[in-house]
Image (cartoon, grey):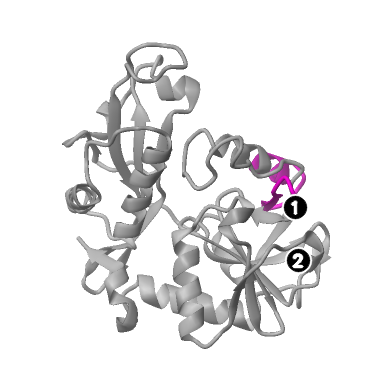
Amino acid sequence: MKETAFIWKNGDFIDWKDATTHVLTHALHYGTGVFEGVRAYKTESGTAIFRAKEHYDRLNASAKMYLMPVSFSSDQLIEANLELIRKNNVDSCYIRPLIYRGYGEMGLNPDKNPIETIIALWEWGTYLGEEALKSGVKCKISSWARLDSRVMPPLAKATANYANSVLAKQEALDCGYDEAILLNINGTIAEGPGENLFLIKDGVIYTPPSSDCVLKGITAQSIRQVAEDLGFSIIEKSLIRDELFIADELFFTGTAAEVTPIREIDGRVIGSGQRGPVTEQLQSTFFDIVQGKNERYSDWLTVA
């Protein structure tokens, strides 16, 4: 990890090396934290956060689902994020806001532990690899099921929830794949460990609904809007794994993954085995947008 100079914590800018926490911090033991993954890109107007309002609104919504009172509004956190970009003097970066239960008392009742809020950022390249954006990734259907709403709130981006994702990711890598795809407990497609999934068949784009235990991805919502604006039909429907195998194209979306093609699942080549034309068009449009080259979506960017 390429360290930057400052991290924002509870309203103050502190040195990176001083951003430490006690080993008995509640969130370390019980997973009582919520977070976001956000990106800022280099544009001609300066470093710009992509969908800042949507990300910070979702962060506070996740905190609400986990009964965590918040001390900062979305607007306050956005302003802190912008100032952090300026103080660290970065052109593009990955941003990690986190709200968590801090050091107080041990035990399952979290109420006597303070709520801590931080924003960190660092320079970070392509999550699944630069080549993956062109050639696509090999995926494995995970043996781990996506967590269910009767177990934990899947619409929350919570630290505890991501133990599920870590297990799926580790399994995929250990088996020689690049990424996993999780089914929900009903056996239909949910998502990747940190990505939403889209399927293209006969020119129509399909994606699973949030009721299939899918996180409402902000990049996914953006791609859906772009696809509709380009004239594509988008259908939300439950998908079974068989439909993935015979798709014309598949791709992941996510803040980290951006728009990444899927070329193979469990030894089955998807479509032509390379990035398809619809995926390429959406991917190209996406990168134009985040780099400030498409005026139609300029309100999706917040410049530092």
Direction from residue 212 to residue 302 in the image, left or right? left
Q: Amino acid at mark 2?
A: Leu
Disc assigned to residue 140: 1
Within 10 Å of disc 2 (Cα), the crowding (few <14, some 14-19, many 20+) is many
Label 1 is placed on what type of residue?
Lys
Q: Residue at x 44, y 69 (%)?
A: 222
86 and 250: which is toward the camera: 250
- Look at the image and give the residue range highlighted in magenta: 169-187
75 horizontally vs 240: left or right: left
Q: Which mark is residue 122?
A: none
Q: Which mark is residue 244?
A: 2
* Residue 280 location, quadrant: bottom right
Residue in front for this viewpoint, 47 or 167? 167
Q: Report the front residue among 171 and 32.
A: 32
Estimate the x, y position of residue 37 in percent, counting from the top left: 41, 50
Residue 200 sits above or below residue 65 on the image: below
The image position of residue 109, as x and y in percent, is 42, 17
Badge 1 element: strand
Q: Is residue 96 visible?
A: no
Quadrant containing the N terminus in the rendered view? top left
Residue 30 drawn at (x, y percent): 49, 22
Magenta includes 183? Answer: yes
Residue 289 lies, with reference to residue 155, above or below; the image says below
How far apart are the two marked residues, 2 and 1, measured between alpha carbons?
12 Å
